[in-house]
Image (spheres, helix red, strand yellow):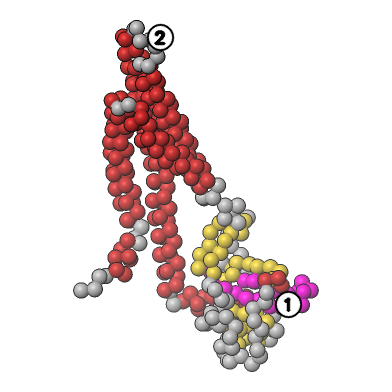
Amino acid sequence: MKPEFPKLLKLLKQPEFPKLYAVASMWIATPLLGICTVIYVHQSIFQPAASTFPIGLSAFGVTAALSGISFSMARACENPATAKYAGEKFLHSAILLIQGLFLIYLRDAVGEIDLLKPWPYLVFALKAVAVGLLSLITAVASWTWYFGFEELNKFFWKNWEERIREMNAVQKDKDTPSQLGVSIFVVSLLFLLPVSGGWTKEILPLEPDLATRIDEHYDHEARLFLMLYSLHGNGQVDYVTGRLVQDYSRSSYGNPVYRTEAYPLFYWWNHTMYNDPEQDGVNGNERVYQENIEFDISRYKPCTFNGQPC
């Protein structure tokens, strides 16, 4: 029997699964963190500092690294408040862990001070205070660490769910037979004339170098990314390409970022619009879509949100 990997992958890409994973991960992480805290406190109380320091330093290093990663992520992610909150919690936890290491050293050092050796009860009391503070600080460090982990955990699982929805939406658009038809219809309006088929009569030049590009636009109705060129370098548009847009997002600076097909679906050059259903670049298989038409950029429908381009 062949393993049904496609069906399994399709099942795992359902948006309900990240919710289940998020709950499961918290149910695993919470008791695990508590157990590790109890073991660490137990060793800190009953083991010498030489045995406890490696574990404490490792916990500090991991927590400090998580704090640095969270603050770095805050500069790039769409929701910086979450990453900053987690980074602050991890940093706070790292500081508390360092304080705990100081207390472990103090607990052992008190008994070695010659000035205090004649008063064993005082040494015992100081050790008891150090152990009590150590237990309290370690518990608070663990609790603070948990808050940072919980916030990041929810953030990442929610993002996974959103990415699945976006991927499913893109796949649905790809599987919709009318998408190409809609693009053709809208582009026909863009160029103001009805369509007519036929094989190319003139040799369409290769897509120009980006140095000759003078403008670009995103037509959200046709889901086309239009690139406008001036081959003669006089600022006049004389070559246009239109690529299908798979999806788009925003950069950390708020600028739109489009993910398009590798090659255009439409070309406009020399008063002629060409159609390339294969979307394999200019190689001679382009069809004349319409002759004797002019490119009218005012007809395109830009996507805006709060006055900003999508």
User: What percent of the width, then of the height, locates residue 175?
Assistant: 42, 74
Where residue 159 appears, x then y in whole percent?
43, 53
Choose the circle earlier in sequence order: 2 or 1: 2
Is 243 contained in the magenta span? yes
Q: Which residues are magenta?
A: 226-245
Identify which residue is drawn at 40% across, 28% down: 101
**As displayed, is residue 148 above or below residue 109?**
below
Identify the image quadrant of the N terminus. Answer: bottom left
Which residue ends up furthest to the front in the rendered image? 114
Q: Position of residue 228 (x, y in %)?
A: 67, 72
User: Residue drawn 39% across and 41% down?
Assistant: 149
Q: Which residue is mark 1?
A: 231
Residue shown at 59%/70% (left/top)? Answer: 225
User: Residue 60 or 177: which is nearer the viewer?
Assistant: 60
For marks 2 and 1, give the CA distance: 90 Å
Q: Which residue is mark 2?
A: 115
| Residues at circles 2 and 1 in contact by the CB criterion of under 8 Å | no
